[in-house]
Image (tube, grey):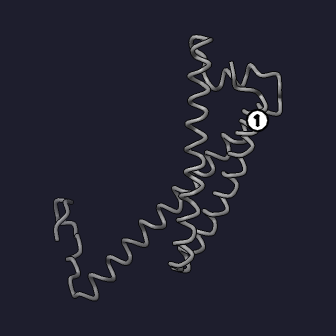
Amino acid sequence: MSVTAAAIKQQIHSDIHTCEELLTLFETEREALKERDSETLDTVLQSKTTHLQKLEHSAVRRSEWSKELAQTQPGGSWEQMINSLADSDIKTEWQTLKTLFTRCKEENEVNGRMIARNQQVIGRLVELLRGQTAAPNLYNAKGSNSS
């Protein structure tokens, strides 16, 4: 196998750093959403895109390394590669990275819900400004919706 433990360790360490920066960006994005600061949101979006591209590139590299392993060890996977290394630091850092991936996903979902809610509020305000308020949905005697 041509991939070295040092290369794996360096890749994981780089991804940890990228995820930590992403978590900071998610926090900045959340504050900008609360303040409705569109300039900050634009900057954060550009930075998030760059960081996500780095993580995507890293995922492609891990996939290539896994395919290379599968050629020499049928059924070989990334997890098996990590577990087969004698370096316990790599195993620890891999677990840290997986935790950071989960946190990034959760933070992104929270911000996504905030964005969706803001869009609903703004849409409702635009309807009010246009005088196009929708009739409220009410329940009839049978318990079904009616306008």
**Left or right, 55 with reference to 93:** left
Quadrant the C terminus occupies = bottom left
Residue drawn at point x = 16 percent, y = 67 percent: 146
Counting the numbered discs, the total is: 1
Task: Pick the residue in front: 9 or 120.
Answer: 9
Q: Position of residue 3 (x, y in %)?
A: 70, 26
Q: Secondary structure at mark 1?
A: helix
Residue drawn at point x = 36 percent, y = 71 percent: 120
**Left or right, 81 with reference to 125:** right
Quadrant the N terminus occupies = top right
Task: Give the residue pinned by disc 1.
Answer: 9
Res 23 quadrant in image: bottom right
**Left or right, 42 with reference to 125:** right
Res 86 quadrant in image: top right
Disc 1 crowd, CA 10 A, few/some/many (<14, 14-19, 20+)? some
Residue drawn at point x = 22 percent, y = 87 percent: 131
Q: Position of residue 39 (x, y in %)?
A: 53, 78
Residue drawn at point x = 55 percent, y = 36 percent: 60
In the depicted structure, whether residue 77 falls above or below residue 57:
above
What kind of residue is marked 1? Lys
In the depicted structure, whether residue 21 falls above or below residue 4:
below
In the depicted structure, whether residue 9 falls above or below residue 39:
above
Q: Position of residue 58 (x, y in %)?
A: 61, 41
Q: Position of residue 29 (x, y in %)?
A: 58, 68
